[in-house]
Image: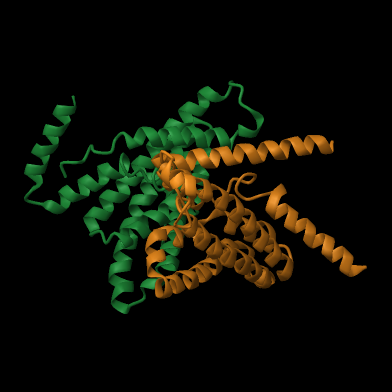
Chain colours: A orange, B green
Amino acid sequence: MAVVSKKSEAGKIIAEGLWNNNPIFKQVLGICSALAVTNLVLNTIVMCGALVFTLSLSAATVSILRNFTPRNIRMMVETLIIAFYVIIVDVILKAYWPQMSDNLGPYVGLIITNCIVMGRCEAYGNANPPLRAFIDGFFNALGYSFVLLTIAAFREILGMGTFLGIAVPYFSTGWDKWIVMVMPPGAFFMLAIVTWILRSVQISREEKDK
Amino acid sequence: MDFKVGSDFKRGKRQMNENPQIWQAFVVCVSAVFTNNILLTYFLGMCPFLAVSREIKTSVGLGWAVIFVLTCTSAINWVTYHYVLVPFGLEFFRFILFIITIAAFVQFVEMVLDRYSQPLYQKLGIFLPLITVNCAILGASLFMVIRDYTFIVTVGYALGSGIGWFLAIVAMAGIRHKLANQRIPRGLQGPGITLIIAGMMALAFIGFTGILQGS
């Protein structure tokens, strides 16, 4: 019985993170990196990997330490925990993939101030046991990742005619490339369109449920 | 008009030739306001930009706070990075150092304002804690490290970035003010329409590219 209730609990957390309370289009958090790294699919995949790692582990760590952290310096401790994991990601990237580290520029470091990480640690990790906090962080990061990958796929195909650097049949030859898609305005438009579509789907579903 | 701006620029360049660093700082500053706007080309500080841009008055307050904090913390971070971290080979430690500097500075400013200038505290006080987690502040410090700016150029860059952010959020607040009574599709309300407007603003700011070709 306990197992079943635990399972449904986990299912609820997963659904919240991926869809109902998706960080990008519902909570509108972490938009900076969502716009900046989505010009190429490869950059996006690496960035999402970094975020999944940081968010799930820092939420779990915050949750483990939640009973030992004095209330008034809580935010500072959370920031330091997040910074600790971000430094690990940054050092690994610099050592093994300097090219990617250059491409992502300051955006890996900016995971520290990414509102999703802070928001999840503050809203969930702070009041729940480690395993649940880990699951919550992991699936919020996945919810972020799937929206970002959608945006990145469209931007790269429409703007450069490639996907993961490989030429896409029609778009690399017959297609008049929309350079604006890989430039900053394209990021804004694409994110707006994705938000629009997903939110509309969500609204219509909610109405059906009623 | 165009011609005049250009010629003023050239004269300025000649005068500043004796001190190229100040000239470079000026160029970096102008380009940070227009062509490399920290918000519209580097997407930093998007969260408060989307959340706080409903009213002109509050966005002006937040804008001022960002200009001030951004300039001061970048200068402090430059000094601590180059005189503390680099000599000891602790560059990877910079994230923690920068974020602590920013948090401490914001706290300090809040206390000083509270003690000595109540009217200013009333105006900016509520925005200061928000600023600690504004990516633009940390982002500017990280950019200054990546691009290897000197101290004067860093100050110019930070000032320009702050002004650029201020401009963008105030313009956005003005537009959103007009939008308040318009009918917008439900899925697009709130962040959606704001992002589309931001995209158009980014397009407009691309028009500034080339303003600094002479540099």
Q: Residue at x 66, y 39 (%)?
A: A199
Quarter of the image with the N terminus of chain B in it: top left
Quarter of the image with the C terminus of chain B in it: top left
Horizontal and vertical percent position of residue B38: 38, 46
Furthest residue to the bottom?
B88
Evaluate whether residue B53 shows in this view: no
Q: Residue at x 28, y 68 (%)?
A: B82
Furthest residue to the right?
A1
Q: Is residue B102 above or below residue B175?
A: below
Q: Is residue B28 left or right of residue A13?
A: left
Q: Is residue B25 left or right of residue A68?
A: left
Evaluate whether residue A62 shows in this view: yes
> Between residues B111 and B140, which one lies in front from this camera angle?
B140
Horizontal and vertical percent position of residue B177: 52, 25
Q: Residue at x 73, y 58 (%)?
A: A14
Q: Is residue A176 left or right of residue A117?
A: left
Horizontal and vertical percent position of residue A97: 42, 70
Q: Quadrant of residue B181?
A: top right
Q: Is residue A197 above or below residue B69?
A: above
Q: Residue at x 65, y 44 (%)?
A: A26
> How many numbered discs?
0
> Between residues A173 and A48, which one lies in front from this camera angle?
A173
> Between residues A188 and B113, which one lies in front from this camera angle?
A188
Q: Is residue A187 above or below residue B182?
A: below
> Between residues A54 and B171, which one lies in front from this camera angle?
A54
Horizontal and vertical percent position of residue B103: 46, 59
